[in-house]
Amino acid sequence: MSKWQEEKAERNRQATARLARSLPAIFPSAVLARALNRSFIPPTPRLAIDSYWRAHPFRADRLARGLATRSGAPAGWTWRLGDGRESGLPLTFRTPPAPYRERAYALGPGFCCVCGQPVYRFGWHIDLWGTGANKNANWHSACVIAWQFWNAPSSEAPFLRRLQARRCGQTGKRLWKRAEVDHRVPLFRVWSEHREASWPRLLAYWGLPNLQVINRDVHAAKCAIEARDRRAASFRYV
Ligand SMILES: [Zn+2]
């Protein structure tokens, strides 16, 4: 065994011991199974849960939208853009609408700012431990990953490529190395044509249902057509 392998094995022994010490009697079995299979074992339950969602961005996306459906939009809320800072309103239509991140509708400690549902121990979305909402948290661990995915879907390109069996989402041809992630319905169109859709149904435009990987030349052509349509609609670009 090389020195590096020995160090890694020792580090994992320590991490496993630390995890075992801090693990509650009840813990999601899929999360634990994944944690123990990692090449670097996460040393705390919280890190085990974060690592689980990081490995399953599509599951996180679906869960976050499902949780948001339970909350629904606050009464009187509409999708608006703003100055960001004070109001919490998004600066551009590229940011997914999230009413509970807005100052006027924030639910406060213990509630997730993305989906509006209570956050429990370790950022989990179900109260497996009967301890009630975690007043120090305002993000579900899954919603952190979903939010990152919605804002930067290109970072999950390898997952999307695999999902499409490495075929271009637009032409069905083999995907090239430099293929790009594309919103089937472009976000400017979501803002200009679907703005009145109910929340959180809107979020599906940022999630997996509206994403595809397409070859670069196809993407460039699609963007050119979209730009022409946008000009034709004399849309005020934000
Ligand atoms: Zn959430």
Image: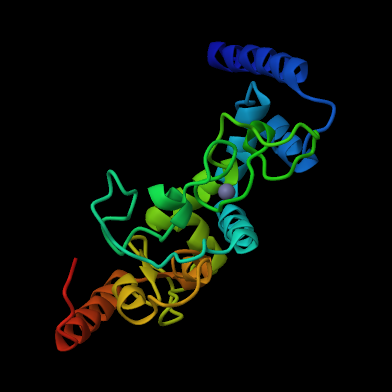
Left or right side of 43 for 167: left
Left or right side of 51 for 23: right
Looking at the image, the residue that sits furthest to the right is: 25
The C terminus lies in quadrant = bottom left
Left or right side of 131 for 169: left
| Residue 115 position (above or below residue 185) | above
Number of numbered callouts drawn: 0
Q: Which corner quadrant of the image does residue 225 belong to?
A: bottom left
Q: Residue 229, image x and y in percent?
A: 21, 86
Q: Residue 196, image x and y in percent?
A: 41, 77
| Residue 175 position (above or below residue 85) | below
Residue 182 appearing in the image: yes
Q: Which corner quadrant of the image does residue 140 belong to?
A: top right
Q: Nearer the viewer, residue 44 or 95?
A: 95
Q: Residue at x 64, y 36 (%)?
A: 49
Residue 156 appearing in the image: no
Q: Residue at x 37, y 69 (%)?
A: 182
Q: Residue 9, image x and y in percent?
A: 65, 16
| Residue 73 position (above or below residue 111) | below
Colour mapping used in the image: rainbow
Q: Nearer the viewer, residue 163 or 203?
A: 203
Q: Residue at x 62, y 26 (%)?
A: 42
Q: Residue at x 57, y 61 (%)?
A: 65
Q: Residue 157, image x and y in percent?
A: 43, 57
The N terminus lies in quadrant = top right
